[in-house]
Image (cartoon, helix red, strand yellow):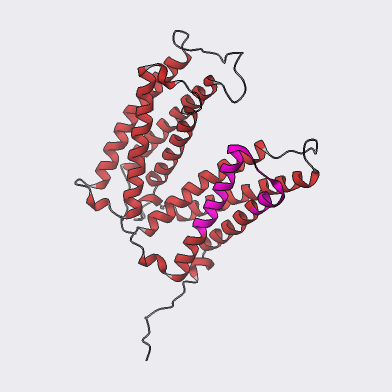
């Protein structure tokens, strides 16, 4: 004789709730996007490969999340499910908007000069669905974000979401660093690289501790650790925000203007400018993070 488990085996809210509908749209838009590209749109070089990776990765993880929530399998996983889904939604939003910008920029065009009109139409359609995919993930972030006064998982708070953005911006900086940025010319610019690396690693560790539900392992209260680290990161980024432009764009060390002999896509000055801009972006993000970290209320095991 079989015993009742005391509840339904399937969670219909996983697909019927507003968040569930958003995730179903993510699956539909993601599948449509990479199918259009793989069938006729085409892709090439590192930019195209990155876009395909983003769409396939986000599609696979979203399918995994829907399956786990629909079948209650997430309760068998030794992770903080609320932190995991919130962190992934933010990461997928950033990755999908990046792909939604890169793919049409490098592959879509309105004319049929170098490609057939059929390929052009597929690329335009893929670009449209890539944009819809970004909107679907952004909607999920909006729906699951922590409301004022609400006690929720850390990654759903403004501070938690900012951690994902900070790590993503750091990845952009690393990409520019390896693209012939000439950071090894001076010890000062090497210090800036150390700043970017240290803050990125600690930010990823903070996210990993929350997603794994292991914040209680820290010897000090997690909220205090986050505030102290964010303050230290601000000080370090302030130093980088001063040092990097001086040693790259001051006439004594570098060039205040883009050299005429620089080729498009292979100019160290361009990489240095990207790094400088995103250094200030991350500095602002850490300052906003510190302001919000003073008032967060969360539960680590949600």
Q: Position of residue 184 (x, y in %)?
A: 41, 20
Q: Residue 278 vs residue 294: left or right?
A: right
Magenta segment: 35-62
Quadrant location of the C terminus? bottom left
Quick check: is 40 in the magenta stretch? yes
Q: Position of residue 76 (x, y in %)?
A: 36, 67
Quadrant location of the N terminus? bottom left
Q: Residue furthest bottom?
A: 1
Seen at 36% across and 86% down, the residue is 3
Comparing 281 with 152, the one in front is 281
Magenta portion: prevailing SS class: helix
Quick check: is 99 in the magenta stretch? no
Q: Position of residue 276 (x, y in %)?
A: 47, 24
Comparing 95 with 140, the one in front is 95
Q: Position of residue 188 (x, y in %)?
A: 36, 18
Seen at 29% across and 37% down, the residue is 229
Figure check: 55 above or below 25: above
Q: Residue furthest top?
A: 252
Q: Residue furthest left?
A: 219
Figure check: 228 above or below 301: above
Q: Residue 15 vs residue 84: left or right?
A: right
Comparing 171 with 289, the one in front is 171
Seen at 37% across and 37% down, the residue is 200
Seen at 42% across and 50% down, the residue is 87
Q: Residue 158 vs residue 121: left or right?
A: left
């Amino acid at each position: 004789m079989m015993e009742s488990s005391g509840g339904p085996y399937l969670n219909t809210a996983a697909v019927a709730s507003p968040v569930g509908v958003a995730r179903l749209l993510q699956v539909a838009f993601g599948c449509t996007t990479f199918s259009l590209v793989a069938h006729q749109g085409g892709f090439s070089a590192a930019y195209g490969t990155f876009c395909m990776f983003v769409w396939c990765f986000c599609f696979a993880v979203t399918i995994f999340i829907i399956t786990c929530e629909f079948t209650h399998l997430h309760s068998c996983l030794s992770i903080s499910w609320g932190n995991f889904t919130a962190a992934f939604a933010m990461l997928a939003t950033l990755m999908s908007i990046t792909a939604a910008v890169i793919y049409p920029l490098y592959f879509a065009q309105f004319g049929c000069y170098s490609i057939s009109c059929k390929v052009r139409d597929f690329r335009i359609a893929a670009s449209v669905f890539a944009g819809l995919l970004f909107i679907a993930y952004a909607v999920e972030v909006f729906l699951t974000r922590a409301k004022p006064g609400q006690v929720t998982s850390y990654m759903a708070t403004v501070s938690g979401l900012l951690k994902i953005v900070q790590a993503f911006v750091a990845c952009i900086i690393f990409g520019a660093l390896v693209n012939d940025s000439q950071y090894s010319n001076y010890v000062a610019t090497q210090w800036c690289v150390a700043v970017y690396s240290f803050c990125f690693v600690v930010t990823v560790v903070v996210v990993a501790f929350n997603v794994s539900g292991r914040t209680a392992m820290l010897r000090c209260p997690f909220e205090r650790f986050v505030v102290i680290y964010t303050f230290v990161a601000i000080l370090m980024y302030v130093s980088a925000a001063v040092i990097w432009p001086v040693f790259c764009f001051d006439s004594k060390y570098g060039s205040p203007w883009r050299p005429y002999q620089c080729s498009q896509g292979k100019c160290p000055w361009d990489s240095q400018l990207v790094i400088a801009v995103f250094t200030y972006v991350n500095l602002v993000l850490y300052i906003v993070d510190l302001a919000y970290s003073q008032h967060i209320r969360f539960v680590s095991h949600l």
